[in-house]
Amino acid sequence: MSKLEARDVNLFFGAHQALKNISLQMEKHTVTALIGPSGCGKSTFLRLFNRMNDLHNDMRLSGTILVDNKNIYQRSADVDALRKKVGMVFQKPNPFPKSIFENVAYGLRINGVRNKNYIEERVTRSLQQASLWDDVKDNLNRPALQLSYGQQQRLCIARALAVEPSVLLMDEPTSALDPASASTIEELIYELKIKYTIVVVTHNMQQAARVSDRTAFFYLGELVEYDETKIIFTHPTHQRTQNYVTGRFG
Amino acid sequence: MKKLFNISNTLITLLIKLCGLISGISVLLIIIFLFSEASGLFNKPSIDQETVIAISKKNTINDPEAIQIKQIFNREIRNWSALGGKPDSILLFRLDDLILYYPADAVTEVPDTMRARINRLFAQHDNLIGYFPASLMPHEFSGRVLRIPNLNVMDFIRGREWIPDARPVNIYGALPLITGTLWVSLLAILIALPLGLAVAIYMVEIAGRNINRILRPAITLLSGIPSIVYGFFGLVVIVPFIQDQFGLPAGESALAGAILLAIMALPTIISISEQAIRNTPQSMKEASYALGASKWQTIHKVMIPFASRGIIASALLGLARAIGETMAVLMVTGNAAVMPSGFLEPVRTIPAAIAAEMGESTQDGLHVKALFALGCILFVITLLINLSVEYMQPRTKKRMML
């Protein structure tokens, strides 16, 4: 049983078809990289799994998206519960203008968690998991916006981890960061896959090659090729994939 | 041709500079005028120059305060011991009372006779206090003329009674008017802020483009209605409603004024807080949704905190409008210049007091100066509010860029 699955997915924004007939499965505790040139639909595809595309009101979807074998676009589906299970990290770090502690505690608080000890424990644990704990443990009440960009992104990861999701969606998580911060995040992704199923959208070929187990190549809303990362980067079936991963276009 | 263009260019620049200079100077002059007029209240005793208050020479009390004199003539103080004198009941004397002391056939308008009679009265009665026109002052007066101390600023602001037409001394205590103004305005904001915020949230998060297309001009229209029309509406609708609901003898009350002002402050509050809420970055909202927050949790925990400065600024601007509002408030608050003790009591606000009393005060009298002093208080209050809005504003802008 795969953790995440898309079956015959077609997605429209108004008259524009963003995704064309996509089917793909992602296994538990793996890292899947979604690659492809800008506008190819990889971010849109990623956002299907926590229903973030719902925020657009002219969206139309056909096909099925399964998380833990449940259709998340069913009428009876609980979107808020889904988003607790499927966490997300965005391209630009977007901490709330609150303290470091309150940022991480946010997800717990909106779930109605009142127990102070439990919240503190979760915040500490999440910051440790996001390898931010050592940077911030002296003062958790500092405003989150005072952190460096790379630290802010790790804070956003900690914030997502605090609600104990089983899936982590990452939408170009390092594209706004300097190389040093980016490699910290990459190491983090590698560690986190022991506990989580991770899907990461990236423009950075080396990054995809380094962190992912499987890679999906998107082009103009179509899934061109999906295979083990090793194969995609060494012996891809399609010429277009070959061209893209070797940097001949994109 | 080019030369002509250059000349007209410098001319226009000069003209614009002149306009700026003139408007700047005139604002300054108006403020100076306001304060210099008001200062006239504080360097004179609050009694007509033509009136004299006197007591018997044997009476040893110190010069009393203006408020004590008012209390004496209102029979609130009936014994000299209350003022530190010998225990003896206070005997009042007004010019009309001369008849009481002299037989009816002895009525006279001859100044000399009147002077003599006044003189004799003050000589005869040790416990007498009275006032009469300065023109009737006897030549060798047997009594002692009381000096009324000048009103000072703190007494003016803290004074709990506003009786500008009291005789022989006028009582100018602005506190009832200041409290009235603040009560009505603050209650108005208390009513208008939750309502306005709700409408703003509705416009940003719930209403579609089509509803907003109707709603926004409607709100603009609301701010364009003349205040006298609001006042009329309040008088015909709100006042009777309050009267019926609370079983009052009269519905004119602080509450009526507050409801009316709340309606008038709504457009300001709605449009400014709507803008502030709309400025919440999409990334913040997404972050919240992605953690499983519902729409209401996102509004409550992310959007409103983010917009809080703008929302406070909107409340302050609404308050500034409410405080300065005159006509509508004048019509529905009942205009009683007493310390308010509840929201269902009539009150008088500062602008209403100025508007209502300007006509009945003499041009050079103290009353006019007291009204100017009220104007100064109002000016200071609104200035403080506007300064705090200024303080809120730049940070909101900085946040927006984020």
Image: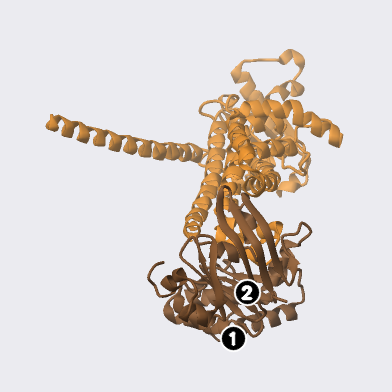
Chain colours: A brown, B orange
Q: Which mark is residue B15?
A: none
Q: Chain of mark 2?
A: A
Location of residue A213 in the rendering, given as x and y in whole percent from the top left corner: 57, 81
Q: Residues within 10 Å of mark 1 (few under 14, many from 20)?
A: some
Vertical placement of residue B264 versus A184, above or below = above
Q: Residues within 10 Å of mark 2 (few under 14, many from 20)?
A: many
Q: Which residue has dot 2 on it?
A: A168
Q: Secondary structure at mark 1?
A: helix
Vertical placement of residue A111 versus B94, above or below = below
Locate the N terminus of chain B by quadrant. Answer: top left
Location of residue B50 in the rendering, given as x and y in whole percent from the top left corner: 56, 28
- Relative to B118, is A116 on the left or the right? right
Residue B151 is drawn in which quadrant?
A: top right
Q: Secondary structure at mark 2?
A: strand
The residues bearing labels 1 and 2 have C-alpha atoms spaced at a distance of 13 Å
Location of residue B180 in the rendering, given as x and y in whole percent from the top left corner: 68, 41
Instruction: Decide if residue A120 is in sight here.
Output: yes
Q: Amino acid at mark 2?
A: Leu
Q: Which residue has dot 1 on it?
A: A191
- Relative to B11, is B139 on the left or the right? right
Of label 1 and label 2, which has the lower sequence position?
2
Marks 1 and 2 on same chain: yes
Residue B195 is drawn in which quadrant?
A: top right
Depth order, front residue of A30/A77: A30
Cβ atoms under marks 1 and 2 closer than 8 Å:
no
- Residue at screen point 64% across, 60% down: A9
Depth order, front residue of A241/A138: A241
Q: Chain of mark 1?
A: A
Vertical placement of residue B277 versus B123, above or below = below
- Relative to B28, is B132 on the left or the right? right
Instruction: Decide if residue B146 is in sight here.
Output: no
Location of residue B217 in the rendering, given as x and y in whole percent from the top left corner: 58, 34
